[in-house]
Image: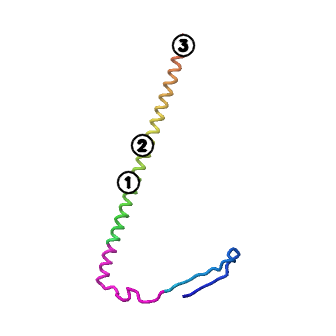
Amino acid sequence: RICVQCQGSKWFQTTALKWELHVDMGDTEFSRNPATKQDLKGVQRTMLATLARAEAISAENEYEKSAEIEFRDASERMNSHVVWVSVFIMLIEGVLVAWQVLHLRAFFRR
């Protein structure tokens, strides 16, 4: 058991700061039963399966990224078309309003 005690700063003058460090020594399970070559082959298989799965996830993420880019581009094209159609409709409505105003002005002057 190791105890370390230090003097506090101005804010902690009334309270002593104390730390304790506990270290346990002894044999571990690994040192009693070391891994065999057969155990390592199982770990190797698991590691390779995990790496293959990570590569599959990465490939899926790349596919989703490309699909998202295609969808965004299609959406932007559609939005552009909608804007042009809206501008065209507004121009037609402006022409119709002008024609109606001229027609009604001529009608009421008669």
Query: Which comes before the other along the chain, label 2 or label 3?
Result: 2
Farthest top residue in view: 110
Q: Tell me the crowding category of disc 1: few under 14, some 14 to 19, or many 20 or more residues within 10 angstroms, Cα based.
A: few
Q: Position of residue 45 (x, y in %)?
A: 30, 75
In the picture as drawn, the residue positioned furthest to the front comes out as 14
Secondary structure of the residue carrying numbered label 1: helix
> Measured from the top left, where is residue 15 in percent x and y?
66, 77
Q: Which of marks 3 and 1 is nearer the N terminus?
A: 1
Q: Residue farthest to the left? A: 38
Q: Of label 2 and label 1, which has the lower sequence position?
A: 1
User: Which region of the structure is painted magenta?
Assistant: 24-48
Examine the image and state in which quarter residue 108 appears.
Answer: top right
Q: Which residue is denoted by mark 3 in the rendering?
A: 108
> Quadrant location of the C terminus?
top right
What label sits on residue 17 in the rendered view?
none
Q: What's the CA distance linking mark 2 and mark 3?
A: 44 Å
Residue beneath the point at 46% across and 32% down: 89
The local crowd at label 3, few if under 14, some if 14 to 19, many if 20 or more residues have their Cα within 10 Å, is few
Question: What amino acid is found at the position of numbered circle 1 in the picture?
Answer: Ala
Mark 2: give few (<14), some (14-19) or many (20+) Cα within 10 Å. few
Instruction: Give the x, y percent position of residue 82.
Output: 44, 39
Residue 67 numbered tag: 1
Q: Give the residue pinned by disc 2.
A: 78
Residue placed at 68% from the left, 77% from the top? 14
Identify the image quadrant of residue 80.
top left
Amino acid at dot 2:
Met
Q: What is the spatial separation of the Cα atoms under label 2 and label 1, in whole angstroms?
A: 16 Å
Q: Is residue 95 above or below residue 10?
A: above
Magenta stretch: includes residue 34: yes
Identify which residue is drawn at 42% across, 50% down. Answer: 72
Q: In this view, does 109 lie above or below 64?
A: above
